[in-house]
Image: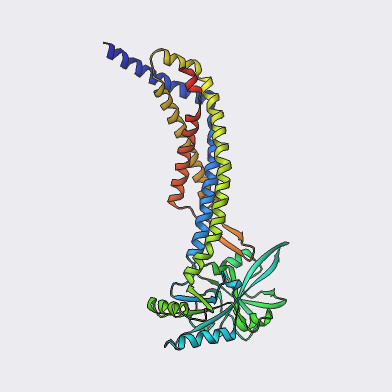
Amino acid sequence: MMAVAYTDKRSAGFGLLGKLHLRMLRQQPQMDILALVLLAIVCGLIGLGLMLSAAIDHVFESSGDPETVLIMAHGSHGEAESFMNTQSAARLRALLSAEGLTALAYDRQLVMSTSIVEKGVQKFLFVRGMTPEISQGAQPYHIVEGEMFDSRFNQIIVGRATQRAFPAFQVGSDVELANKTWLVTGIFEMGGDIRENEVVADLQRVQAAYGAEDFLNTVRIKAADEGQVERILDIISSDETNEFTAMTENEYFIKQSLSISKSVSNLQMLVMGLMIPTALLGLLSIQRIQRTNMMDELRMLNFIGFQSRNIELSLLVRSTLIGVAAACVASLILSVGIAGRSLELDLSFQIVDIQFTVSPWIYGSILLGAVVIAPLASLMSSVIKEIYQ
């Protein structure tokens, strides 16, 4: 009989507790809405930071050819700060020819950062000069509009991302670079490669425009296979003159992304370090008010023998449901409002256009953050302890 009575009390207690939560939701919906909005903002910022990191990683990781060897001056950390001359390129050719590699195509390139004022805003753009014979043969630039530049004239092809950042760069238009007028002959794509943020012209034309007739930044060699890539890398790394640094194009671009990714990660940590405690304090205040309004009913449940841990569990479930709803709202906003859009990222030396996408792991991270923060705020509340002291 006592067991039946205890079960009846538990059932009545759970029923009363459920009605109590529903009554509070009807009478004071603004409190739950405020908690949901606050948590959705935090989750949205977390998701936006993850989307930014993923977009940056994607544009760099999808750049470069693993079977193209990129050679710079020794000690250089990037193309723009690597300087070689035509004699250096000749010594490189002699070094590889001495090891029996005589049928290689050498793509000598010069990359210059150019300042352009677009709608009153100063932006920076990479202008890349490439070897004429390479531009006329096998090259990674897929022309999707117009045609390849003619090496005999001041002509350029424009990356698809550059065209988005600089609307004036259209096929057939004249643009001014390095105080010279250039005709845009084509728009190219490279499968999301970061070099879609550049314009490309004939090497000698770029050298003349920037007064760098005898200078290069890099030499690229398209290898026949992975074995030849390793052989070229070994020859250059074992050279006693220590004049060159070599790696694959893909490896180079991944290394270039590390410092940018680190900066973005530090920014994310700063934002989350500010927002998560703020969200916890806000949710804690909201839940304190809600529990204070429920005080009489909670004491009555305690009086009839309903255990405190069951009440605490119901409050955790309520907080978790709010967290799930907030994660859904944040995910919906990111999917509809942010995914598919592009962002111009200013890297000081050039503008990089990145595309936002939302992956399943980002949705999962948003959901995990929400269902951790909301119940944590509930656990931090000390009102439930005050009731049963």
> Quarter of the image holding residue 128?
bottom right
- The residue lying at 41 percent from left, 76 percent from top is 230
Q: Position of residue 213 (x, y in %)?
A: 65, 84
Specify whether residue 315 is in view. Answer: yes
* Nearer to the camera, 147 or 356: 356
Say whether residue 119 is left or right of residue 156. right
Instruction: Examine the image and state in which quarter residue 67 appears.
Output: bottom left
Question: Residue 221 at what x, y percent from top left?
Answer: 48, 80
Q: Is residue 327 above or below residue 257?
A: above
Q: Residue at x 53, y 86 (%)?
A: 91
Given residues 255 and 180, the one toward you in this image is 255
State the scheme by which the image is colored.
rainbow
Q: Is residue 261 above or below residue 110?
A: above
Regarding residue 23, the answer to whether it shows in the image is no
Coordinates of residue 19 in the picture (x, y in percent):
44, 21
Q: Exactly how many numbered labels are in the figure?
A: 0
Most extreme residue toward the left is 1
Q: Residue furthest top?
A: 1
Could you tell me which residue is drawn at 38 percent across and 14 percent down?
305
Residue 115 as seen in the image, left or right of residue 228: right
Position of residue 58 measured from the top left corner of the image (x, y, whole percent): 49, 61
Vertical placement of 318 versus 51: above or below? above
Nearer-the-camera pick, 68 or 173: 68
Q: Where, quadrant-wise, is the N terminus in this rendering? A: top left
Farthest residue in the front direction?
A: 240
